[in-house]
Amino acid sequence: MTTDNNEEEVLGKAYDARLMRRLLGYLRPYRGAAILAVVCLIAGSALSILQPFLIKVAIDEHISNYDLTGLGGIAALYILTLVGVFGLSYSQNWLINLTGQKIMRDLRMEIFRHLQKKDVAFFDKNPVGRLMTRVTTDVDALNELFTSGVISIFNDIFTLTGIIIFLFVLNPRLALAIVLILPFLAFVTLMFKIKVRHSYRLVRTAIARINAFLQENITGTSVIQLFSREKRQYGRFKVVNKEHLDANVLSIFYYAIFYPILETISALAIGVIIWYGGHEVLSGTLTIGTLIAFIQYSDRFFKPISDLSEKYTILQSAMASSERIFKLLDSPPMITTPAIPAASEAKEGSIEFRNVSFAYNQGQPALRDVSFKVSPGEKVAVVGATGAGKSTIISLLSRFYDVCEGSILVDGVDVRNYDLRGLRRSVGIVLQDVFLFSGNIEENIRLRETGISGEQVRQAAETVHAMRFIEKLDGKFDARVGERGSSLSVGQKQLLSFARALVFNPKILVLDEATSSIDTETELLIRDALEKLMVGRTTIVIAHRLSTIQNVDRILVLHHGRVREIGTHQELLRLKGIYWRLYQLQYKDQGVH
């Protein structure tokens, strides 16, 4: 497995004003709760800062003077500050976490809505694991920013500012002695930031590899088990998981060094206060209450610094995640509805490919100058070897991709001028690999379309003979369908896909190897359903099994992206060209000549 993780390794600035302004835009609908949270936070910090000062007053003005009359009032006031801090802290935490969760909900919905609009070519180039990381891990990083970062930084800055003011008010000389330690503290913090930045990059890269590896291996479990590759894949995952472990251990190592150093510096600061302040107390220039208040303020002084260092990691993570999220959101869909659509839905169902050329990758054309017409109600088959361009025709008709040259017309209107949703509703596609969603049988037939009644669903199921197995299921139409239809057989899933196509009643029907996974008995049943399904509809049938297309109106033979032969089954056999050779290869074992 080779997955490009360069995007995960990119780390932006620890703070980017442009990104932060955009992120704060998501806070706008909840600004009332955010402002109230900030008010609670600042009020709580103010009460917390006041506590050492109350202790100073209690010692210097009451205990030292043996004045017990006012001591009770100071004690009651101190208890009130504790209760106030608790209540304000609870309110702030509740408000900001609730707001953060609502913002994450909004952001996830915006990303999901944007992904639904993206064209198929985008998903060809972007692994599913990476896109899942955007909706999960990256959004969670922004949640930390809103709940533990932006608002809490106000608290740390306010607390630091308040403590410094109180220190200089109490004793400027002693406060200056503490401030002199700050350059050394700044150096240690800077080194920590550099090292943590590196370890964070490693963690991000490792988690991206785990996501991509898990997505690929869970999706391909049946292949892994079929070829008994469990042990080898386990070994490969062990390596990827070890990289993630090592990256986190390195990050833990830096934190394990930084916080003890911070504690040591704090202890040194307190030691300086006790030594210098003790001399001041003994000389009578400093009260014992002021010294104790200084010790408490010094102890509280280093906690916001420690918190700010941790916020740096949160900020860096959020900036990197937001850059990736906004890069996704800012990438416009390549396939969109024009500002003024020329048509909404197909009325007749005629199709014309006019000199169409297309390449998935530059220099490797899948179709070359393809031209053909299909009249309303006509049944046309497209055959050819693997890679001839058969499925590409379907993708272009449904406008999953846009043509590189030429044009595709439906009812005489270029598909690029259609309302995109209306165009795709006009084209019903039954694929070889049927995709079913988690839910029940009925939901998978009508895809939660409210305009389709339960009776219509039942009639569609009866028409394609799906009722034969639905009636045997517990709950019938309410029977649960596992992820990707795991609880159903391949044939049963195929029958449901026919019912789904029928119930949406499209003008154009496309069958892409639609009976290739059906056993002989089921195929006989479904041929009758197909005849009913194709009545009044323009039908394009793509099949490797030539026995299923002998009764169509015309057959197009593709070879290396070009239309090489057109005619009925018998006409093409008489030509003894590409179609005749394909026919011979399929039936040589049955003695057909």
Image (cartoon, rainbow, N blue to C red):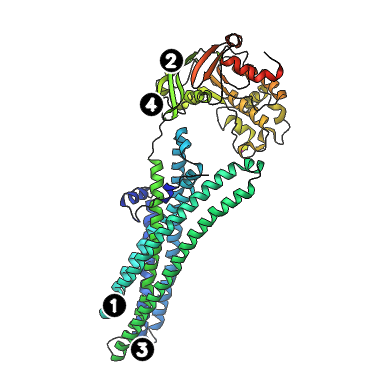
Q: Which residue is mark 3?
A: 64
Q: In this view of the protein, which residue sits in the foreground, 480 or 119?
A: 119
Secondary structure under badge 3? loop
Say which amino acid is labelled 2: Gly
Above-or-below relation of 353 to 478: above
Say which amino acid is labelled 4: Pro
Secondary structure under badge 2? loop
Can residue 84 be seen by looking at this rendering?
no
Q: Which residue is mark 4?
A: 338
Residue 433 is covered by the magenta coloring: yes
Residue 351 is covered by the magenta coloring: no
Say which amino acid is labelled 3: Ser
Report which quarter residue 317 is drawn in: bottom left
Mark 2 → mark 1, Cα distance in angstroms: 84 Å
Can residue 458 be seen by looking at this rendering?
yes
Mark with earlier residue (3, 4): 3
